[in-house]
Amino acid sequence: QVQLVESGGGLVQAGGSLRLSCTASGRTFSNYAMGWFRRAPGKEREFVAAINRSGGGMYGPDSVKGRFTISRDSAKNTVYLQMNSLKPEDTAVYYCVQYTGYYVSTSTEPRYWGQGTQVTVSS
């Protein structure tokens, strides 16, 4: 059974940074692409970033490019999302996801989801 456990969310002022972590269990971590989605209040779920087995990253909205960085550590079965220069519009619940394959695109649907971690950015 796959489990994804996120941590690192919280309250931060605009301009600050947070690093989200997600530890996966249940499957061989290094075999699968990982990613992050978010859902802001009153908005649709949004793809944020994904990283392939090889470590190649991709990002969704233009608003996060250059500010967010996704990375993975297979020795720790963990994927990270480093978020810098945070803005109030980044406020959302952030979900860690795992895909069925090792290589994905920005439109690939994830297979497994974590419970989510709240990120709140105050102005």
Image (spheres, rainbow, N blue to C red):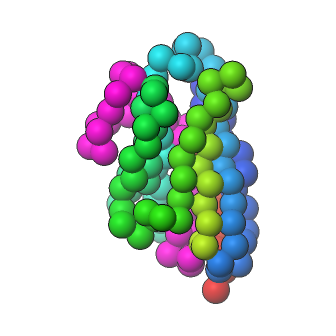
Query: Can I make out residue 112 in this image?
Result: no
Quarter the N terminus occupies: top right
In this view, 34 is above or below 90: above
Location of residue 110 (image quadrant):
top left
Q: Is 80 on the left-hand or right-hand side of 104? A: right
Residue displayed at 54% across by 19% down: 30
Which span of residues is magenta-colored?
Answer: 87-114
Please, is residue 18 above or below residue 121 in the view?
Answer: above
In this view, which residue lies farthest toward the bottom?
Answer: 123
Q: Residue at x 65, y 78 (%)?
A: 15
Question: Looking at the picture, how far across and down is residue 14, in whole percent?
Answer: 65, 80
Which residue occupies 44% across, 49% down?
49
Q: Position of residue 82 (x, y in %)?
A: 62, 54
- Check residue 31 for magenta coloring: no
Res. 107 image quadrant = top left
Q: Is residue 122 visible?
A: yes
The residue closer to the viewer here, 85 or 37, is 85
Residue 85 horizontal/vertical position (percent):
60, 73
At 29% across and 39% down in the image, what residue appears? 105
* Residue 121 vertical position relative to residue 68 in the rendered view, above or below: below
| Front residue of this view, candidates 60 and 94 | 60
Residue 94 counted in the magenta span: yes
Image position of 76 with respect to 67: above or below: above
x, y percentage for residue 72?
Answer: 59, 35
Which image quadrant for residue 123?
A: bottom right
